[in-house]
Image: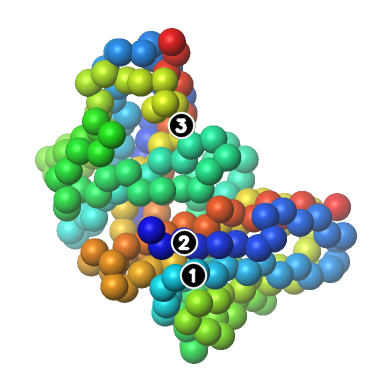
């Protein structure tokens, strides 16, 4: 089946630095991808919708200048956490919509653990 | 605001026992509801969607609009069913991907 891959799987960065997480659709073209955030033992929270070739749409309460999203190609969306702080430490998950799949099938990446020290 | 509620954080049953994982949603328009499963150290994957009315791995879920519920059921639980289960609904009808999730229920099936 279709696969969505995230890189890196885990990353540790220092406070004040920026870190980029990639989300790739490996065998289909995804005009739309989604970014979620998950705190330990909590639910996934939708952060933003990433649209290929246009600006991302952010959910209420998500700082767009803090979480920069770029969807420059049909198979790649990136999430950059800028000026990271310890409270940004979380599990970040992306998903991608396969428009050719039945009912706009959604595939999830394996997630990326971010720890800010 | 649209919400999905899973009242149980943890559900522990013995192998062979029936299982019901509860999910309620706030009513708004035509809901599209899903159950996702996350096995240990694996990615989230789709288990069921209400429009398909299918049975996957012995699990079924029926949309009850009157009770605004979409409970997940299995008559005889297996140890390999142990996982995190998330109920979710689509925010945009017939346009998959923009999901809101419930808090998740950890199912533990004991031998």
Q: Residue at x 52, y 84 (%)?
A: A73
Question: Label 1 to label 2, Cα distance in Å?
Answer: 6 Å
Residue B39 appears at what percent x and percent y? 48, 37
* Image label count: 3
Q: Comparing marks 3 and 2, which lies closer to the viewer?
A: 2
Question: Label 3 to label 1, Cα distance in Å?
Answer: 25 Å
Q: Residue at x 28, y 34 (%)?
A: B57
Q: Mark 3 belongs to which subunit?
A: B
Residue A101 appears at what percent x and percent y? 28, 67
Residue A52 appears at what percent x and percent y? 47, 83
Give a yes or no on whether discs 1 and 2 share a subunit: yes
Left or right side of A86 for B95: left
Q: Is residue B110 above or below residue A11?
A: above
Left or right side of B55 for A89: right
Q: Residues within 10 Å of mark 1 (few under 14, many from 20)?
A: many
Q: Comparing marks 3 and 1, which lies closer to the viewer?
A: 1
Left or right side of B23 for B41: right
Does the residue at mark 1 contact the one at mark 2 (Cβ under 8 Å)? yes
Q: Residues within 10 Å of mark 2 (few under 14, many from 20)?
A: some
Residue linked to disc 3? B83
Residue linked to disc 1? A25
Would you say residue B93 is visible in this rendering? no
Residue A71 appears at what percent x and percent y? 54, 81
Q: Mark 2 belongs to which subunit?
A: A
Task: Locate residue A29: give its quadrant.
Answer: bottom left
Q: Which residue is nearer to you in this view: A82 or A8? A: A8
Q: Which quadrant of the figure contains the N terminus of chain B? A: bottom left
Q: Mark 1 belongs to which subunit?
A: A
> Does dot 2 land on a helix, a strand or a loop?
loop
Q: Is residue A1 above or below residue B83?
A: below
Residue linked to disc 2? A3
């Amino acid at each position: 089946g279709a696969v969505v891959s995230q890189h890196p799987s885990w990353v540790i960065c220092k406070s004040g630095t920026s870190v980029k997480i990639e989300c790739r659709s490996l065998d289909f073209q995804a005009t739309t991808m989604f970014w979620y955030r998950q705190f330990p033992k909590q639910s996934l929270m939708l952060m933003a919708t990433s649209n290929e070739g246009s600006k991302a749409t952010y959910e209420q309460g998500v700082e767009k200048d803090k979480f920069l999203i770029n969807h420059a190609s049909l198979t790649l969306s990136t999430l950059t956490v800028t000026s990271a702080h310890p409270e940004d430490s979380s599990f970040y998950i992306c998903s991608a919509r396969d428009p050719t799949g039945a009912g706009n099938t959604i595939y999830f990446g394996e997630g990326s653990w971010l720890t800010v020290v | 605001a649209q919400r999905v509620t899973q009242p149980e954080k943890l559900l522990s049953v013995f192998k062979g026992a029936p299982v019901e994982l509860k999910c309620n949603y706030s009513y708004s328009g035509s809901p599209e509801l899903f159950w996702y499963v996350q096995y240990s150290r694996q990615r989230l994957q789709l288990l069921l969607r209400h429009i398909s009315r299918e049975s996957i791995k012995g699990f079924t879920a029926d949309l009850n609009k009157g009770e605004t519920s979409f409970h997940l059921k299995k008559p005889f639980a297996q140890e390999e069913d142990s996982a995190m289960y998330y109920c979710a609904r689509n925010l945009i009808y017939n346009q998959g991907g923009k999901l809101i999730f419930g808090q998740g229920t950890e199912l533990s099936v004991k031998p």
